[in-house]
Amino acid sequence: MFAAVSIGIEKWPGYQIHSHNYRVPEPFCGQIVVLIGFGPSAFDISRDIARVAKEVHIATRAPEVKVSKLDNHDNLWLHKMIESVYEDGKVTFQDGSAVYADTIFYCTGYKYHYPFLETNGIVTINDNRVGPLYKHIFPPRLAPWISFIGIPMKHYEYKNWLLAQIGLPPLEEWRIKLMEEAIKFVIPKEDGYRNQWDDDYWNAVVESKEVKSLENKHAVAFEGAVEVP
């Protein structure tokens, strides 16, 4: 589990934990915390811990990373990967920076493992892929008695299928595009990704005849409404 840091880790005195074991931020109050990885787990945990920690430092293998404080956070930094750690608690990064940390978080991903589940080969795990699963949820030979939730990264097809089962329309195309744009910008732009949506496009939508027509209808309906005491 701790293979992400090899130089000096056996003598580093701080606390080490995998993201799988994280529950609440309070135990890290006032600490200097280093997280390895920049996937969904690191993104969520770093923001959660930053509310109580003294400093949070994220180490990533992403190329062209420079030491920088992340937008909208006073105590959250991004670094290149850890270079080495030392007996005095020092953690150095490949970008030349260093901190004295209390905790190292390993947000290095998961391997699917279901030791409690015996399916006689009906559901298997190959190359960290669970299958066969219809809609990434249901094993055909075992449905509807068992399902796997949260395995795929994208759920649009399943959500649309589920909405259809209860008689609701599918997700609008613009909602799907909005979510995809947010996901695309969330890592390279950190917390600034919300500003990357096409403002000109949405300004044009707001000023369009269709939207203006809806606004006028709502205004007329509001003016004609009777207040109920």
Image (cartoon, rainbow, N blue to C red):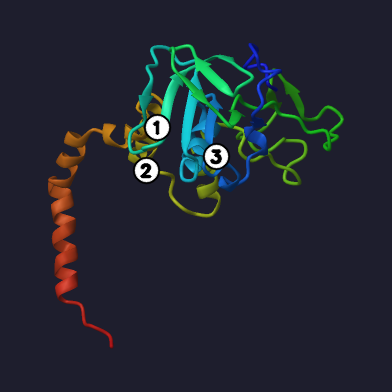
**In the rendering, which numbered label is found on residue 180?**
1
- Of the 4 image quadrants, the one containing the N terminus is top right
Q: Residues within 10 Å of mark 1 (few under 14, many from 20)?
A: few
Between marks 2 and 1 in the image, the one whose residue lies nearer the viewer? 1
Q: Distance between the residues labelled 2 and 3?
A: 14 Å
Residue 193: x %, y % from top left: 33, 33
For disc 3, the marked residue is 158
Residue 45: x %, y % from top left: 53, 38
- Amino acid type of the residue tagged 3 in the rendering: Tyr
Q: Distance between the residues labelled 3 and 1?
A: 16 Å
Q: How far apart are marks 2 and 1 (CA)?
A: 13 Å
Disc 2 secondary structure class = loop
- The reply to whether dot 2 and dot 3 touch (C-beta < 8 Å) is no
**In the rendering, which numbered label is found on residue 172?**
2
Residue nearest the viewer, comparing 96 with 47: 96
Q: Compared to 7, does 21 lie above or below?
A: below
Residue nearest the viewer, comparing 87 with 72: 87
Q: Compared to 16, does 7 lie above or below?
A: above
Whichever of callouts 2 and 1 sits on the residue coming sooner in the sequence is 2
